[in-house]
Amino acid sequence: MRPFSYTSATSTAEAIGLAASEQVRFLAGGTNLVDLMRAGIEEPEHVVDITRLPLDGVEELPDGGLRIGALARNTRVAGDARVRRRYPMLAQAIMNGASPQLRNRATVGGNILQRTRCGYFYDRAAACNKRVPGAGCDALEGFNRMHAVLGASDSCIAVHPSDMCVALAALDATVNIAGRDAAVPLTDFHRLPGDSPHVETVLAPGELITSIDLPAARPGRSVYLKVRDRATYAFALVSTAVQVHVENGRVAGARIALGGVAHKPWRAHEAEELLRGEAVDDDLLRRAAERSVAGARPRAHNAFKPELATRLVRRALEETTS
Ligand code: SF4
């Protein structure tokens, strides 16, 4: 590991003041950053420890929503009675991620900012545009079973690994960033790879996530479903967060997000539009599930993903509309 200097910040202003360089990283739970530093993938010159900042609360908002501090531990958020009652798919998504030990350490902000688990990204002998811009991408013709089928580019086909973010995308969560007047919708926070996959979010160097806002809970039923190779402690092959409100047999509102399929949590707006106002029946749910992966472009080893995602979304729609 490359030597680095370390400061424990005592205020948000101090943390930001110390971080106005691309060579600085904020340290919170450390469950991803420390691994990346050990592997020589992240080599900051300076680490700013932010764990002493008062950003770990879960508070009510005047509009009926919840504000979740960026330093709130994943376990705490998933166990919060308000989250479990008003946003059950968020609690389900968090509980589907990582191991209990990791959830006890990992923070909400770190979960959002965690980096891809593409094996070539972690292999310093492999070509990876995300690790070394312009180096190429060994995943394109390599073992790409876990990789993206939506929104990818010829520069990068990595997926975002978070379960929590899939639920946040479906819930229309927004990200509060210190110093910015307007919050950023979670669905706009992560970038698609394009020709610059090393730029993963809209955060500028030195910017700090302070909290996540959830809008007031909406009527209807929701569920988070995940398919993975093991029953626990595995990243999603495909996951989905679905919330549907049915009134008098018709869909009054629908929100569908997918994980494990793209460089960011993937919101299936076209499928939501197809559902809105329609009478619920098997054919409608089938067509909406198929629409949720419209435009999918599989690679050599992940041709199963569009069909798997279609079946998973359909199951989630059946559970939330029955
Ligand atoms: Fe790197 Fe992205 Fe290619 Fe993986 S898919 S090797 S992260 S450029």
Image (cartoon, rainbow, N blue to C red):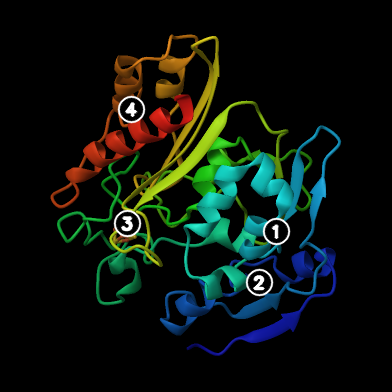
* Circle 3 residue: 228
Q: Which badge, 2 or 1, is on the more N-terminal residue?
A: 2
Q: Which badge, 2 or 3, is on the more N-terminal residue?
A: 2
* Circle 1 residue: 70
User: Residue at position x 15%, y 52% from top?
Assistant: 301
Marks 3 and 4: CB-CB under 8 Å? Answer: no
Q: Mark 2 and mark 1: span between their CA atoms?
A: 9 Å
User: Residue at position x 19%, y 49% from top?
Assistant: 302
Q: Which badge, 3 or 1, is on the more N-terminal residue?
A: 1
* Circle 2 residue: 28
- From this view, report whether residue 106 is shown above or below residue 168: below
- From this view, report whether residue 111 is shown above or below residue 66: below
Mark toward the viewer: 1 or 4: 4
Q: Which of 51 and 77 is in front in this view?
A: 77
Q: Which badge, 3 or 4, is on the more N-terminal residue?
A: 3
Q: Mark 3 and mark 4: span between their CA atoms?
A: 19 Å
Circle 2: is it few (<14), some (14-19), or many (20+) Cα within 10 Å?
A: many
Q: Where is residue 115 in the image (x, y as percent from the top left)?
A: 46, 62
Q: Which badge, 4 or 2, is on the more N-terminal residue?
A: 2
Secondary structure at numbered mark 4 = helix
Would you say 205 lies left or right of 43 here? right
Quadrant field for ligand 1: bottom left
* Circle 4 residue: 289
Q: Mark 4 and mark 2: span between their CA atoms?
A: 37 Å
